[in-house]
Image (tube, rainbow, N blue to C red):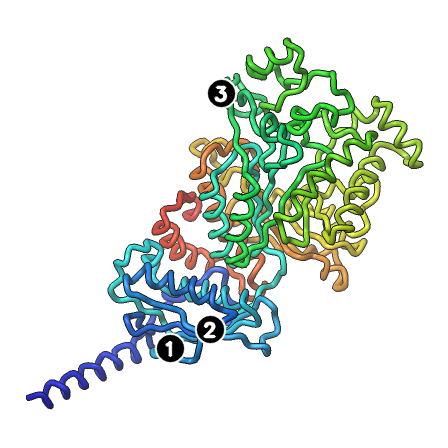
Amino acid sequence: MRLLVILCLYVLSISCSNKYKEAVNSDKDYAIIPKPLAMETAKGKFLVDKNTKIYGEASLAKEGQFLAALLEAATGQEILFTEGKKGNIQLKLDSSIDNSEGYHLEVTYNKIIIAGKNAKGVFYGIQTLRQLMPAAIELGNGSLKELTIPAVIVKDAPRYVYRGMHLDVARHYYPVDFIKKFIDLIAMHKMNTFHWHLTEDQGWRIEIKKYPKLTEIGSKRHGTIIGHHPGTGNDETEYGGFYTQEEVKDIVKYASERHVTVIPEIELPGHSSAAIAAYPFLSCFPEEPTKIYGDMGSKKSKQFQANGTPKVVQETWGVMDDVYCAGKDETFEFLQDVLDEVLPLFPSNYIHIGGDECPKKNWERCPNCQKRIKEEGLKDEHELQSYFIQRIEKYLNSKGKKIIGWDEILEGGLAPNATVMSWRGEEGGIEAAKQHHDVIMTPGHSCYFDHYQAEDNENEPLAIGGKTTVADVYAYNPTPKELNQDEQKYILGAQGNVWTEYMKTTDYVEYMILPRMTALSEVVWSDLEVKDWSDFRIRLKVFLNRLDAMGLNYAKHVVEE
């Protein structure tokens, strides 16, 4: 009798083994975004169960633990990563892989191997493995009693080294948990950079201990315009928020564990009204009241100004004339002090210094600025802006950092080691690349996710204007045809920009970025040869099931266009 039971169990195990070994998979099982460089599908499925063990070398422990947590949350089974050579999911380093972010993934019915040039490549292999699993894994409620992964061989690597998403937290502040969710989305899409826009006319969002008024005063505005710029009124409600340095450290660590680099933006010399409200000496004219554009300022701001406090944080959107004074050494001392506190928080090689939309009206009538122009032998205020940017760049270079600036930093002469972020079309990027400067493409027609998403926008939430559809994003090629082969190598990649004047809530942000971010992820990862709009739409519909499971608020209607 005992022998018969053993024999029955043996036959059952063989039958189960054959079931997974011979299982047939469908095209929907391989709907991976961004599309891999090379993929070979096969029969068979790998079963994740109580016998699943992840193993690899110690340097891949974080990646192993990330995968283990994903599988454990989906199945309810205890799944661990262990150092060593025993298990059926192996994570390993492979020096023969050419691209530093490349990976190889092999899934058969009885084993999975994920290899990368380094830990980042292994992490991206895990992200592909994640998309080979059903969308229900994202629920993380232990409900998947049978979790299988289709057999496949993938060899993959990104097209561009810079694959980024930007988020403006100055117009509207978002809590730490959402910033982490935003980073999770970046990582899931195999993007590698989070450009964090921390300072603006409407709010200063990072703690600087030497200058406490930046957050005591500069992080709060007394009201915000109602409706589209210039507004139909003011909501008369104080709005504010900022990130402590400890919170910043936590976010940067969280991003690092997901192989996302955080680049902070400290805007200068324009878009600086919030800092000036906190420290009026930074203005060319400290005693002049902040101009409240369109007379849409709050009653409280007007009362402050009437009572002798001329500078207030801006409550409307647009470009403001009150900018950092370029003629005072105190301005540069302030900015250097700020940067001295910012730099230790961010291990990134880059610091973004803005440089865009800097009106010159105050500089034209400022005695200190005119004196600076004369003493430095500058031709005009455009060259004064270049002087400003180059002076900051020299300081940052001395600290081992490089600068990125919006394409206006080309005006008056480009700083020697600067990287240009081209937003006013591609012209600035083309010019910078021809000058052999690194370039990140972010043109509005393809990369601005604050635009409307459809031709008919009557039923859309309020946006700044323009139209950028998922198809517009997907059709974009960040490498302009105007560049020769040598110049093309200066195009580092592209980035989606999320300006938040009208995005008051986190679900609003989700709606505006998804699924446009998904389209951009394929633009910056996949080779042109494997890109296909019709094929992408099919895969996108499968991918959206994952966003549903994650509880994300994406624009559903745009997929049907």
Which residue occupies the extreme front position in the image?
210
Q: Which residue is at a point 47% across and 58% down the rendered structure image?
A: 536
Q: Which mark is residue 87?
A: 1
Q: Judge depth for marks 3 and 1 and give the one in front.
A: 1
Crowding around mark 2 (Cα neighbors within 10 Å: few <14, some 14 to 19, many 20+) is many
Vertical placement of residue 484 versus 452, above or below: below
| Residue 468 locus on image (x, y percent) | 55, 43
Q: CA distance from mark 3 to mark 1?
A: 58 Å
Closer to the camera in the image, 149 or 48: 48
| Residue 360 locus on image (x, y percent) | 78, 28
Residue wearing tag 2: 91
Total marks placed? 3
Vertical placement of residue 6 versus 497, above or below: below
Q: Which residue is at a point 43% across and 55% down the rendered structure image?
A: 540
Crowding around mark 3 (Cα neighbors within 10 Å: few <14, some 14 to 19, many 20+) is few
Q: Which mark is residue 237?
A: 3
Closer to the camera in the image, 28 or 367: 367
Which residue occupies the extreme bottom position in the image?
3
- Residue 45 lies left or right of residue 252; in this view the side is left
- Residue 2 lies left or right of residue 217; in this view the side is left
Q: Which residue is at a point 32% across and 57% down the rendered structure image?
A: 136
Which residue occupies the extreme left position in the image?
1
The three-letter code of the residue at mark 3 reads Thr
Residue 335 quadrant: top right
Whether residue 152 is visible, yes or no, is: no
The three-letter code of the residue at mark 1 reads Gly
Crowding around mark 1 (Cα neighbors within 10 Å: few <14, some 14 to 19, many 20+) is some
